[in-house]
Image (cartoon, rainbow, N blue to C red):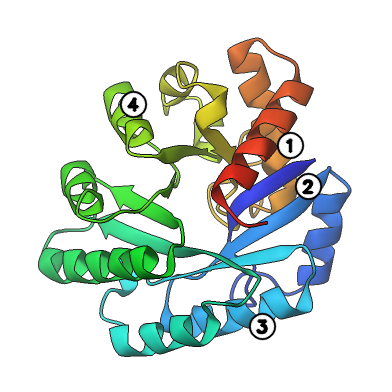
Amino acid sequence: MLIDTHCHLTNEFFQDIDKIIENAKNNGVKRYISASDSVLSARETILLGQKYEDVYIALGIHPENCFDSLEEMTKILEENWNNPKLVAIGEIGLDYYYGKENKQRQIEVFEYQLSLAEKYKLPVVVHSREATLDTINSIKKYNVKGVMHCFSGSLETARELINMGFFIGVGGVTTFKNSKIDQIIKDIPLEKIVLETDAPFLTPDPYRKFKNEPKYIRIIAEYLAELKHIDITEVENITTDNVFKIFSI
């Protein structure tokens, strides 16, 4: 069994979610964690988890939406903290790629959501782009564990995160010819890796001209097996076991 630990299965991106899930199941993908990125998408994501048996959910405010209402997100989480489909707070984090003009607001929103994760004893799904030091410093303030989504840092950073109780999210970027992240991923123990698509974004090679879907988890698993010179069955078994260690699925 393969599990897509990070996708965005909302109507904003997919017109026929039934078909998307069918495509994934036909490729051996049997569980999905759909992450919200805003207050608006959090409400839709909750409904998604109610409708589909194999879809679990993560609720949070992405740094690009850092001016969303923290009060509203808190209310949503308080109403759903015992929802059996809620397995994480995410996608949360810091993103300085387009500038740092709202840096303090991003940190405030990120740390507030980390505090909620600590309060409700939920893992976190963290997005970090050109903000590694601030991301790690914020995480260290709270007793939380989780996944570093779409990891793109150094091997030293990966080891530090692993020592903090985090797993490394590996997705389509690993297959990109010029990304070089595969040379980092090959030295990260498989026991600390989970698979993710970030669908509809970051489609793996050789399908980059198409919208990403959870079905492409198999492509990522095959690439990882080749990278580590092991059988894909080993990748499936170990990464799936890793998911069960982090999330209540």
Instruction: From the image, tell me which residue sits under label 2.
Output: 29
Q: Which residue is at 65% across, 10% downward?
A: 229
Instruction: From the image, tell me which residue sits under label 4.
Output: 159
- Mark 3 residue element: helix
Disc 2/disc 1 C-alpha distance (Å): 8 Å
Instruction: From the image, tell me which residue sits under label 3.
Output: 47
Query: Of the residues under marks 3 and 1, which one precedes in the sequence?
Result: 3
Marks 2 and 1 in Cβ contact (< 8 Å) = yes
Residue 66 lies in quadrant: bottom left
Q: Is residue 1 left or right of residue 132?
A: right
From the top left corner, tell me how far across and down residue 179 is, in percent: 42, 29
Q: Which residue is at 30% across, 83% downward?
A: 70
- Tally of numbered discs: 4
Residue 161 lies in quadrant: top left
Disc 4/disc 3 C-alpha distance (Å): 36 Å
Disc 1/disc 4 C-alpha distance (Å): 26 Å
| Above or below 232: residue 83 | below
- Mark 4 residue element: helix
Amino acid type at mark 2: Val
Amino acid type at mark 4: Arg
Query: Of the residues under marks 2 and 1, which one precedes in the sequence?
Result: 2
Query: Of the residues under marks 1 and 4, which one precedes in the sequence?
Result: 4
From the top left corner, tell me how far across and down residue 165 is, in percent: 39, 39
Disc 3/disc 1 C-alpha distance (Å): 27 Å
The quadrant of the rendering that contains the C terminus is bottom right
Instruction: From the image, tell me which residue sits under label 1.
Output: 218
Q: Is residue 83 left or right of residue 144?
A: right
Counting other residues with Cα less than 10 Å from the Cα at mark 4, is it few (<14), some (14-19), or many (20 or more)?
some
Q: Is residue 131 left or right of residue 231?
A: left
